[in-house]
């Protein structure tokens, strides 16, 4: 869990993913000698803060978004949201401006819902604040801010260890409207002819998707993937005997939105562990679901 | 009307258009020997469940979406919408899961608006349900579920009979956020240099667009097409003496959204018959409007 | 201010930008001999009503939208909005239909908010109406309809006078959902490898952005640009000693939306003077902010 903890502690809200990108590039540099296959690393320049890893002869690409939700300091002590963070008075927020490190407290106006911070000084306009990471582990669970999507990133990095053929793409801006998957998808499709995707991200515990019951295969959220592709994934999961649950939602989205609406014919499916306390500092995931998520990705990347 | 009736009876909600695609490929195979021009058929593989027909030296492309609205079974007896179907307690729904064929009844909670089904057994999670087709014909009207857009598909297929130069593109996912027109549009533009489009789809009867008064030429809906292109279409309709009506709406959308927002400079116009009882099992269209729709498409494909 | 006044008086609502395009092409033809660098002019055909000017060896592209908000005549005396115009009973509107020139009055139903017009005759369905231009100038301010975005266009044209290396792109449909920047961005990126953008547009006076305090550099609106690019712009503005303000908003958008979501990796930043009485016939901007806007663009195009 050290890797996951390290990932959760890095501040990288949408638009400022660079610190996490740098961490990953170092991690990949250090660990790829131990991986079954050495990937080609595509990063920098026209890839902004994204990273693409190409292993062997790829048929399927895994997308894991780097960015997290957070807050931007507006005028005076006002805050505005980056993505859709949960907000409760008392949440601890951290950041940094020209005057130094910041650790402050979120305040939610009970009547208007307006967001502000409590701190001994005024914070510079435009400063980004993220949840302070309090990483907690039990025998069966991990709990922290930003399991969404550092757990999806962790899953992708662990997948790298044994991957023979495939692509791992680390994307930006997913929590705040998107902005990188369109060009990652175009590059991958045009360069490698790959148009099968798996979205390595975290979903919600609901009445139909329970913690500890296995990774969720999403049949739909606000968008609907192509039925025939999802059926192939269900069959592989069933035949491999990997614990999984079927998710059916009317709302929610992911990096898949840009695949679905882009100018390449991607088949995609969201496959991810469910979490409770979504978008709060207390996101919690069952370790059993992390394990089945990784096992299913390993199987899918072999068979798809 | 046999062709239209056959089209309306095929279940093909957004994401699972394959059954209609197969029907169309067979239909095209059988009937193209009788068409004035034999088209090139582009389908399968990277075109997912879409079909493109290229006739002669194309200047204009017609887009007709294959998919329909419907419902997905969620957890327990809950349903969530595919696209924006009308919902009333008592509507008959059909589908199929691993346990066999389904014919059940829609139920709308009067207080919460929540959707569920009445059936003697539980239906498998993720199963798609569509309206049961009750096709009705009078001397002056046709009535059925899914005239939107099987009538647009019918119009495109009838147009094939006499078309000399042009493209017909059958698209997917239109009712649920889109997802195929972006790549169809890119392929057509890059391969054939075509960037004029007509949207063969069905619109609404309103205070300004009346049944039986002719096909509607839409000057705008939630999006606004380029004025100069729409003016050319109006002029052709006027000079050909084909009954038509001008539509001006602030809402609604079509496959044109992906043309408008994509990375190719398409000119587009929605040209379609109006229907009443929109997105219900009882959609109704005047035969006179079907006739003027087909006549106008024939004229436009000659002159544009 | 003669140029700005001329620009404000031309009716060019989204979808019908052609009159302004023609004005600009004539203006460019006439004035480019006096510019430091003669640009390549790309317009017509597949560029619809957009114009691209290429100066020298470009590294950065400036986007300025041509279109304005307005109204479309629906059925009877109803109006629907083009973009998001402010609406108050009594606003003077102008237009033209087959029966001749129109000058009418906007009426807003107090209860329903429904829009209609008062005029001695019925106006043809689909006719576009725009605010009547009442251009007012004081020592310190200009006031008119459509400073958004004729002032952004003015800024771009003034920038042309001294520009050595760069691209100016005049776009369409910005006020009504977009539709041209996706293909302009693709063309510019693929042809010139340029992927740095500045959005030459007008923003809002708010509690944090005050008239006369300098051009606004937007750190975010509904979308969040890449932090590292915005930081470079802030540094250049600071070091050049040009008056500027930092904007942080949770809503609002611009041509940047299509850059952010398109399939090329653009870095972008909105840099524009603030106006009050947004989207009304009485938009007002401080001349000092126009001056700092132009000065900052000149500096940015040199240094970025």
Image (cartoon, coloured by chain):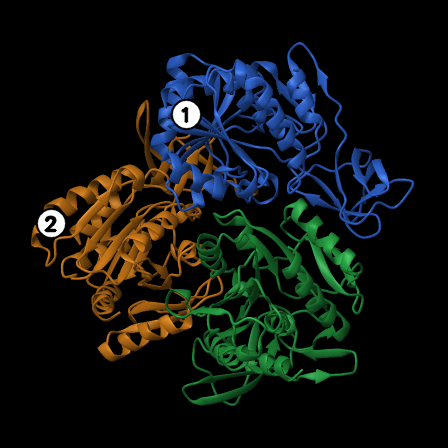
Chain colours: A green, B blue, C orange
Q: Which residue is mark 2?
A: C31
Q: Nearer the viewer, residue A192 or A36?
A: A36
The quadrant in which residue C57 appears is bottom left
Quarter of the view holding residue C159: bottom left
Pointers 1 and 2 within a single chain:
yes
User: On the rendered structure, is B39 left or right of B14?
Assistant: left
Q: Is residue B290 visible?
A: yes
Depicted C49 relative to depicted A161: above or below: above
Residue A23 placement, left or right of B89:
left
> In front: mark 1 or mark 2?
2
Q: Earlier in the sequence, mark 1 or mark 2?
A: 2
Quadrant in which the N terminus of chain B appears: top right
Question: How far, Cα to Cα, is label 1 from label 2?
Answer: 42 Å
From the viewer's perspective, is residue B229 above or below residue B238?
below
Q: Nearer the viewer, residue C134 or C195?
A: C195
Chain of the residue on which disc 1 is drawn = C
Q: In x, y percent, where is residue B206?
A: 57, 27
The residue under label 1 is C122
The one nearer the camera, A262 or A52, is A52
Residue A86 at least partly seen: no
Q: Position of residue B155 (x, y in %)?
A: 55, 22
Regarding mark 2 in the picture, which secondary structure is present there? helix
Mark 2: give few (<14), some (14-19) or many (20+) Cα within 10 Å. Answer: few
Name the residue at 43% across, 45% down: B262
The percent position of residue C19, horizontal first and vertical second, equals: 26, 38
Position in image of residue A257 (x %, y %):
56, 54
C236 or C57, nearer to the observer: C57
Q: Spot the residue most to the left.
A: C34
Note whether B236 is above or below C267 in the view shown. Answer: above
């Amino acid at each position: 869990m050290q890797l996951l903890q390290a990932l959760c502690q890095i501040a990288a809200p949408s638009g400022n993913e660079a610190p996490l990108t740098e961490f990953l590039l170092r991690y990949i540099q250090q660990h790829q000698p131990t991986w079954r296959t050495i990937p080609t690393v595509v990063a920098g320049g026209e890839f902004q803060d994204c990273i693409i890893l190409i292993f062997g002869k790829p048929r399927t690409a895994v997308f894991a978004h780097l960015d997290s939700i957070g807050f931007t300091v507006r005028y005076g002590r006002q805050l505005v949201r980056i993505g859709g963070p949960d907000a409760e008075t008392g949440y601890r927020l951290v950041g940094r401006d020209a005057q130094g490190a910041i650790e402050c407290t979120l305040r939610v106006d009970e009547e208007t819902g307006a967001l502000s911070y409590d701190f001994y000084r005024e914070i510079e306009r435009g400063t980004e604040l993220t949840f302070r990471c309090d990483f907690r582990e039990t025998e069966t669970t991990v709990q922290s801010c930003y399991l969404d999507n550092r757990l999806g990133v962790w899953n992708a990095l662990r997948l790298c260890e044994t991957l023979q053929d495939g692509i791992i793409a680390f994307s930006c801006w997913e929590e705040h409207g998107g902005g990188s998957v369109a060009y990652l998808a175009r590059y991958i499709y045009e360069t490698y002819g790959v148009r099968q995707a798996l979205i390595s991200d975290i979903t919600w515990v609901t009445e139909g998707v329970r913690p500890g019951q296995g990774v969720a295969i999403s049949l739909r959220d606000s968008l609907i993937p192509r039925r025939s592709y999802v059926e192939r994934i269900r069959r592989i999961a069933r035949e491999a005997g990997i614990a999984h649950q079927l998710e059916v939602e009317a709302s929610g989205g992911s990096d898949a939105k840009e695949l679905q609406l882009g100018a390449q014919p991607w088949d995609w499916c969201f496959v991810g562990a469910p979490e409770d306390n979504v978008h709060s500092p207390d996101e919690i995931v069952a370790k059993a679901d992390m394990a089945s998520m990784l096992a299913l990705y390993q199987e899918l990347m072999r068979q798809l």
